[in-house]
Amino acid sequence: FVKPVTKDVSFFLTDVNLPLSFADWRRLLNPEVFYDPLRAEFDTTMEDCQVLQLFAPGDALVSMRLASHPMMLKWSSLVGKPACTRAEEGHLLRVARRRDFPRPGMWCYVQACMNQETMMICEGEGSAHTTVMIMQEAGDAVHCREIIRLHRVPAWALDKMPNAADFVAQWVAAFRGSRLCAVLEAEEGLREYMVLALRKCERGPPLMPVSFEEDTWAPCDREFFSVSQYLQMFAEKAGVDLLVYDSMDGQHVVPYQAVVSRAGWHQAEAQFMDYFRLQRAAYRRIFGGSAAPVIKADVEARFVPVQRWKELQQQTYGGRVA
């Protein structure tokens, strides 16, 4: 149904039950999966797509070129706009998913068109528009409300919008038989993310290497210390290829936790921990005692509102983190 907001702006709302488990659909809406180039092999609406930049788990800049699919052509003819991106280069989108939003237990997915020259959000063109999907579990399926923001679309066109329910069912069936689905099953969750926690900092934050060769170390500043920044800097100094984040799916983890991809940690863990054991030995030598910082992998995430993250960042290493 259609909900007018102003004279020129309206929201087009569609409710549909997706024939996938909630866990499977949530994994599928990981931008690194949803915009995998293999999607073009089974998605008849997609010519090609890829992730251009990952800002954080669940938040990415992507590109896509749509195919000449009948439903897409009908949609474009009804609600198309003057181009805000160069059509021959396809569409540039900022996509993000967020857990427990707008309410606990729900997931929200947003895509917004970006102007390729200004890198600002724009109205969209053709079949690409700012879109929000709100999902919640509904038995063995997922209830999804899709909300599309339309600008200056006449009322007669809104009444002729294509029904997406049948297309979604066909899309899910095609995905289940696709090479992308087989690859995801073979990877066994390696594209998902996991949480690391820093523990046993009895005498303050861990040490940062000055020189591994000379076994020299420098203390970290207690104020504004965060594990994500520390682990990222430590990995870079050790020459370990690892990307570390302080948030996941739109929510910050507490300052003594950090987020990494399972694939990234799987590849980097052995080399990283070899260097981190040198830090543990130096920590005991410099501060005394038997305790030294340890890294616990794949722990349960503890999220904190962004307005409290800075406050906790200052408090966490004023004393100890057990």
Image (cartoon, grey):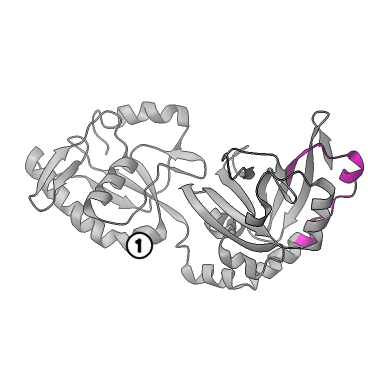
Give the answer, above or below, for where 205 lies relative to 294.
Answer: above
* Residue positioned 41% across, 53% down in the render: 194
Give the image location of residue 163, x and y in percent. 83, 55
Give the answer, above or below, for where 261 lies relative to 82.
Answer: below
Region in magenta? 146-167
Residue 26 in the figure: left or right of residue 258: right
Q: Is residue 149 visible?
A: yes
* Residue positioned 76% across, 63% down in the render: 68
In the picture as drawn, the residue positioned furthest to the right comes out as 156
- The residue that mark 1 highlights is 266
Q: In which quadrant of the rendered image does the C terminus lie?
A: top left
Element at label 1 = helix
* Residue positioned 11% across, 49% down in the render: 281
Residue 46 in the figure: left or right of residue 26: right
Q: In which quadrant of the rendered image does the N terminus lie?
A: top right
Q: Is residue 22 visible?
A: no
